Image (spheres, rainbow, N blue to C red):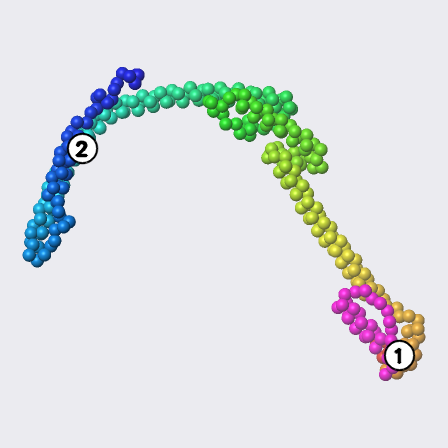
C-alpha cells in the first residue's frame, strides 16, 4: 500500500461546522447591537423595572442559545460517533492488526539475528580464553557485560571481549607475585576485581594477627598467673624454718612482754600474706606457751 493511492483529505471533509460558525458570527453582531450602551445605563427607582425586564430578556436569550448549543452539539457528535465507529471497523483496526503482524515477523528475525551474533561472540570468547589459558577459571560469558543489539558492530563487541580477557590475564600475573597469592586468587575467582580481592585478603590477615596477638597475650597472662599461684602455694605449703638466732632466742626463757622482730620477704597476694602472718603469729605464741610450761 503506497501513500499516494489514498488522499485522506479528499475523503473526509467537514462542511457543516463552517456554516454554523458563519451563523454564529451574525448572531454575535446582533447581540453586540442589542447590548450597545448597556454599560452607561443607570438603574434608578423610576427605571428599575425596565432594567429588570431587560435583564430577564437577556437571560432568556442566553438560555435559548444554550439549549440550541446543546442540540447542535448532539447533532454534531452523533455523526462523529458513527464516523468513529465506522473508521475503526474499516481502517484503524485493520491497520493496527497488520502492523502487529509485521512487528512480530520483524521481532522474530531480529531475535534470530541476535542469537546468531551472540553464538559467534561466545565462540570467540572461548577461543580467546584458551589463548590466554583462562578456560580453567570457567568465567561465564555474561560476566563481560556485553550489550548485544542488532545495531552493535561485531568489531566493537569483540574488542570488548579482548579487553576483558587481557585484563583477567594481567590481573592473574599481578596476583602471582603477591604475598597471599592463593587466597587472593580464590577471592578474585569470585569477584574478578584484583584491587578488592587483595584488599579483602590483606584486611583479613590484619584482623587475624590482632586476634593472635590478643590470644598470645592472654596465654602469657594465664601462664604468669599459674606460676605466681604455684609459687605462693609452694611457699605456704613448705615448713617454715626460722633462722638459728630466732630458734635460740625462742629456746630461752623470755618474758611475754619482750617483743621479737623477724624480717623476711614473701611474694604472694594480699589475702595470702595476711593469712601467713596470722599463722606465724599463732606458731610463735604456741612455742612461747610450751616453753613457759
> Quarter-wise, where is residue 158 in the image?
top right
Which of 15/98 is in front? 15
- Please state if 63 lies on the left or on the right of 178 as rendered: left
Q: Position of residue 36 (x, y in %)?
A: 12, 45
N-term-proximal mark, 1 vs 2: 2
- Please state if 167 lies on the left or on the right of 60 as rendered: right
Q: Position of residue 154 (x, y in %)?
A: 52, 21
> Quarter-wise, where is residue 83 in the image?
top left
What number is the disc on residue 291? Answer: 1
- Please state if 215 lies on the left or on the right of 102 as rendered: right
Identify the residue at horizontal 87%, vertical 77% (top origin). Answer: 260
Asked whether the viewer can see residue 42, the reply is: yes
| Residue 207 is one of the magenta-drawn residues | no
What number is the disc on residue 183? Answer: none
| Residue 260 is one of the magenta-drawn residues | yes
Q: Position of residue 187 (x, y in %)?
A: 63, 36
Mark 2 lies on residue:
77
Question: Which region of the structure is painted magenta?
Answer: 257-285
Above or below, 180 relative to 213: above
Identify the residue at horizontal 63%, vertical 21% (top origin). Answer: 131
Identify the residue at horizontal 71%, vertical 37% (top origin). Answer: 179
CB within 8 Å, label 1 to label 2: no
**Callout 1: 10 Å neighbours few (<14), some, many (20+)?**
few
Above or below, 177 relative to 289: above
Which of 38/175 is in front? 38
SS of the residue under disc 2: helix
Above or below, 70 relative to 104: below
Residues under labels 1 and 2: Cα distance? 140 Å
Identify the residue at horizontal 93%, vertical 71% (top origin). Answer: 244
Amino acid at each position: 500500500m503506497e501513500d499516494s493511492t489514498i488522499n485522506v483529505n479528499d475523503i473526509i471533509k467537514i462542511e457543516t461546522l463552517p456554516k454554523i460558525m458563519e451563523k454564529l458570527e451574525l448572531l454575535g453582531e446582533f447581540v453586540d447591537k442589542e447590548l450597545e450602551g448597556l454599560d452607561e445605563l443607570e438603574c434608578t427607582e423610576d427605571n428599575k423595572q425596565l432594567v429588570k425586564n431587560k435583564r430577564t430578556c437577556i437571560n432568556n436569550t442566553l438560555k435559548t442559545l444554550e439549549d440550541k448549543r446543546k442540540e447542535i452539539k448532539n447533532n454534531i457528535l452523533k455523526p462523529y460517533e458513527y464516523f468513529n465507529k465506522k473508521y475503526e471497523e474499516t481502517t484503524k483496526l485493520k491497520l493496527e492488526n497488520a502492523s502487529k503482524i509485521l512487528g512480530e515477523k520483524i521481532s522474530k528475525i531480529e531475535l534470530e539475528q541476535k542469537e546468531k551474533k551472540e553464538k559467534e561472540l561466545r565462540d570467540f570468547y572461548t577461543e580467546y580464553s584458551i589463548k590466554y589459558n583462562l578456560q580453567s577459571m570457567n568465567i561465564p560469558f555474561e560476566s563481560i557485560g556485553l550489550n548485544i543489539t542488532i545495531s552493535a558492530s561485531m568489531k566493537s563487541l569483540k574488542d570488548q571481549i579482548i579487553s576483558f580477557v587481557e585484563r583477567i590475564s594481567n590481573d592473574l600475573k599481578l596476583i602471582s607475585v603477591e604475598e597471599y597469592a592463593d587466597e587472593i586468587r580464590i577471592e578474585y575467582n569470585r569477584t574478578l576485581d584484583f584491587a578488592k580481592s587483595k584488599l579483602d585478603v590483606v584486611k583479613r590477615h590484619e584482623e587475624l594477627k590482632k586476634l593472635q596477638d590478643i590470644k598470645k597475650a592472654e596465654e602469657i597472662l594465664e601462664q604468669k598467673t599459674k606460676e605466681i599461684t604455684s609459687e605462693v602455694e609452694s611457699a605456704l605449703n613448705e615448713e617454715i624454718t626460722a633462722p638459728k638466732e630466732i630458734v635460740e632466742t625462742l629456746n630461752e626463757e623470755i618474758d611475754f612482754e619482750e617483743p621479737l622482730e623477724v624480717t623476711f620477704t614473701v611474694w604472694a597476694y594480699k589475702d595470702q600474706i595476711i593469712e601467713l602472718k596470722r599463722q606465724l603469729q599463732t606458731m610463735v605464741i604456741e612455742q612461747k606457751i610450751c616453753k613457759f610450761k
